[in-house]
């Protein structure tokens, strides 16, 4: 499978200053993240809050500039192209944000929100824009007679459908979805995820799907990357990762999944000790070692590289089989 998107060594550090403007530290938000997404593929990116997954998603669409690293979309590093070329590349990659109310202009009607990308990219005919908006609204399960309503007139799930329609307006090859269902009720989450799956099958889209919900990630993803404190600690096919998680951190995430079988609820859970370290002062060696039951001196001293594991995934752990 050819790579639509290649992310290589992506890193983003943020300087922290005091009230006088003097530097007092550096937040290591994302460090040396690499992955690929093929045409028509979904990569799920998962981890606890603060692990850096949203920062990765914003760097993929160049809303945040990386400290170093490359984001290569269809053969072009988006961080090295001109403003005018980046405008053209934005047709190929679009984003759906977490909060559908915050990401939509409350003063605009749904029609204007969905049509704005078309206008920005040169579709001057109002009739053509309206026809495209009607098509998009119907594709995401909204009615054409709702197009003059503002976001306040829609439910949370409907607002996210508007955001998806806006992302589809320019026929992108890749959609970056940053926690697109976490602000919705559980029943509505399933509807929106299934809608995205159906659209992907129909249009051949690729997704970078960011979430902290393992159930959602398992349902929608072809492959999964697990992040911890700014780094990918395990990556592989969804079936392999859920059947045989290799990294100790991935195993603790799996243990957090609800168990519908009462007998399995009584099984001993692997709960990591302590708190997540601060990205202002990340641990030496493996970042997970202060909480890991397998940690030894080598974990405290040496940063593990991603390597093939017996379960079919790649994991960054000195002791995983």
Image (cartoon, rainbow, N blue to C red):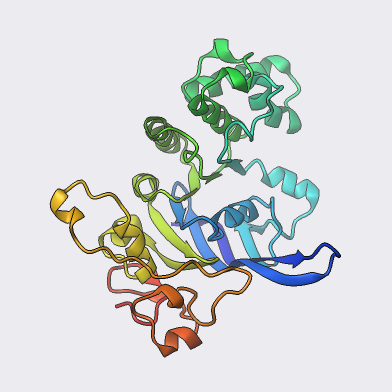
Residue visible at 33% across and 74% down? 309
Q: Seen from this angle, which residue lies furthest left?
A: 263
Q: How many labels does the image show?
A: 0
Q: Where is residue 130 in the image (x, y as percent from the top left)?
A: 65, 17
Q: Position of residue 9 (x, y in %)?
A: 59, 69
Residue 139 versus residue 27: which sits nearer the camera? 27
Left/right placement of residue 58 relative to residue 38 reads right
Residue 232 versus residue 249: which sits nearer the camera? 249
Can residue 146 be spotted in the picture? Answer: yes
Residue visible at 66% across and 19% down? 109
Left/right placement of residue 201 relative to residue 246 reads right
Q: Position of residue 183 (x, y in %)?
A: 50, 37
Q: Seen from this angle, which residue lies furthest top?
A: 145
Residue visible at 75% across and 32% down? 120
Pick the quarter of the image with the C terminus.
bottom left
Q: Position of residue 99 (x, y in %)?
A: 57, 37
Residue visible at 57% across and 74% down? 282
Q: Seen from this angle, which residue lies furthest right?
A: 20
Left/right placement of residue 207 relative to residue 57 reads left
Residue 198 versus residue 3: which sits nearer the camera? 198
303 above or below 126? below
Can residue 75 be spotted in the picture? Answer: no
Pick the quarter of the image with the N terminus.
bottom left
Quadrant hosting residue 17: bottom right
184 above or below 59? above
């Amino acid at each position: 499978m050819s790579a639509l998107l290649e992310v290589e060594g992506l890193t983003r550090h943020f300087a922290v200053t005091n009230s006088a403007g003097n530097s007092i530290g550096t937040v290591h938000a994302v460090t040396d993240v690499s992955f690929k997404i093929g045409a028509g593929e979904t990569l799920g990116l998962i981890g606890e809050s603060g692990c850096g997954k949203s920062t990765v998603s914003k760097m993929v669409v160049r809303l945040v500039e990386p400290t170093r690293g490359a984001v290569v979309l269809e053969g072009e590093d988006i961080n090295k192209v001109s403003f005018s070329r980046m405008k053209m590349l934005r047709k190929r990659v679009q984003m759906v944000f977490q909060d559908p109310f915050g990401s939509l202009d409350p003063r605009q009607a749904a029609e204007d929100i969905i049509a704005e990308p078309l206008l920005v990219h040169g579709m001057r005919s109002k009739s053509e824009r309206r026809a495209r908006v009607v098509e998009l609204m119907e594709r995401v399960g909204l009615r054409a007679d709702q197009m003059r309503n503002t976001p306040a007139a829609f439910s949370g799930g409907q607002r996210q459908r508007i955001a998806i329609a806006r992302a589809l307006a320019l026929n992108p090859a890749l959609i970056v979805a940053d926690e697109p269902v976490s602000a919705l009720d559980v029943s509505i989450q399933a509807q929106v995820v299934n809608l995205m799956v159906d659209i992907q099958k129909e249009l051949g889209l690729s997704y970078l799907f960011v979430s902290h919900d393992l159930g959602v990630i398992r349902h929608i993803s072809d492959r999964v990357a697990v992040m911890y404190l700014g780094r990918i600690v395990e990556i592989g096919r969804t079936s392999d990762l859920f059947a045989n998680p290799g990294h100790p951190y991935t195993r603790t995430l799996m243990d957090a999944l609800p168990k519908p079988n009462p007998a399995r609820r009584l099984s001993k859970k692997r709960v990591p000790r302590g708190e997540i370290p601060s990205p202002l002062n990340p641990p030496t060696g493996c970042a997970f070692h202060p909480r890991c039951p397998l940690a030894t001196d080598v974990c405290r001293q040496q940063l593990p590289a991603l390597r093939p594991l017996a379960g079919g995934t790649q994991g960054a752990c000195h002791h995983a089989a």
